[in-house]
């Protein structure tokens, strides 16, 4: 087995039966694959057979979706929205020279109303998204 470094930084390792090229000149298929030998030998039947067999095999990679963190985006968005609107209400009430008791009541009522509206909005948004996804599966 020998190894050499080319000018573009790719390394070629040459063995008795295998040749591995790393970098932009790396082949898309392994050197010893049936499809590559059919391509290089201009063998249309072998190429057709390889691709027909490949189509009948079950897919080896499935889509993987994360199930964690589903509430992270709404929590961050709701938290930022709540902080900004609560600050605006309290700053406006303080600037209007209202009593501290009124400022606190306005601030807490704003936080409660924001939490309620964000919760209902997130529920309705998730419900609509799920219904849309399920309606799309009907067409599949």
Image (cartoon, rainbow, N blue to C red):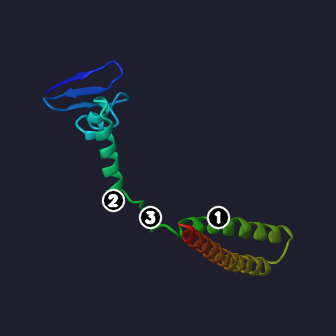
Q: Please tell me whether residue 66 is drawn above or below residue 39 in the rendered image.
A: below
Foreground mark, 2 or 1, reads 2
Q: Characterize the local packing of mark 3: few (<14), some (14-19) or many (20 or more) Cα atoms within 10 angstroms.
A: few
Frontmost residue, 18 versus 102: 18
Lower sequence index among marks 1 and 3: 3
In which quarter of the view is residue 106 placed? bottom right
Which residue extends farthest right?
A: 96
* Residue at image location 30% in from the left, 40% down from the top: 45
Element on which disc 3 rests: loop
* Residue at image location 36% in from the left, 56% down from the top: 61
In which quarter of the view is residue 91 placed? bottom right
Please state if 140 lies on the left or on the right of 37 as rendered: right
Q: Please tell me whether residue 133 is drawn above or below residue 64 in the rendered image.
A: below
Please state if 66 lies on the left or on the right of 89 as rendered: left
Foreground mark, 1 or 3, reads 3
Lower sequence index among marks 2 and 1: 2
Please state if 99 lies on the left or on the right of 78 as rendered: right
Q: For the residues marked 2 and 1, what is the alpha-carbon distance in whole angstroms?
A: 46 Å
Which residue extends farthest front?
A: 45
Please state if 34 lies on the left or on the right of 104 as rendered: left
What residue does disc 2 label? 58
* Residue at image location 75% in from the left, 81% down from the top: 105
What residue does disc 3 label? 66
Q: For the residues marked 2 and 3, what is the alpha-carbon distance in whole angstroms?
A: 23 Å
Element on which disc 1 rests: helix
Is residue 14 visible in the rendered image? The answer is: yes
Q: Position of residue 15 (x, y in %)?
A: 15, 29
Q: Position of residue 26 (x, y in %)?
A: 33, 31
Q: Are marks 2 and 3 in contact (CB under 8 Å)?
A: no
Is residue 60 visible in the rendered image? The answer is: no
Lower sequence index among marks 2 and 3: 2
């Amino acid at each position: 087995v020998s190894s050499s470094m080319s000018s573009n930084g790719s390394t070629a390792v040459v063995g008795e039966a295998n040749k591995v090229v790393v970098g932009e000149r790396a082949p898309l298929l392994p050197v010893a694959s049936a499809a590559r030998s059919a391509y290089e030998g201009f063998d249309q039947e072998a190429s057709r057979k390889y691709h027909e067999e490949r189509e009948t095999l079950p897919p080896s990679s499935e889509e993987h979706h994360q199930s964690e963190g589903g509430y992270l985006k709404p929590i961050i968005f709701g938290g930022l929205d709540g902080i900004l609107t609560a600050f605006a209400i309290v700053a406006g009430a303080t600037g209007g020279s209202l009593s501290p008791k009124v400022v606190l009541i306005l601030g807490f009522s704003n936080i409660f109303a924001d939490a309620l509206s964000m919760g209902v909005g997130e529920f309705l948004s998730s419900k609509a998204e799920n219904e849309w996804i399920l309606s799309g599966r009907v067409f599949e």
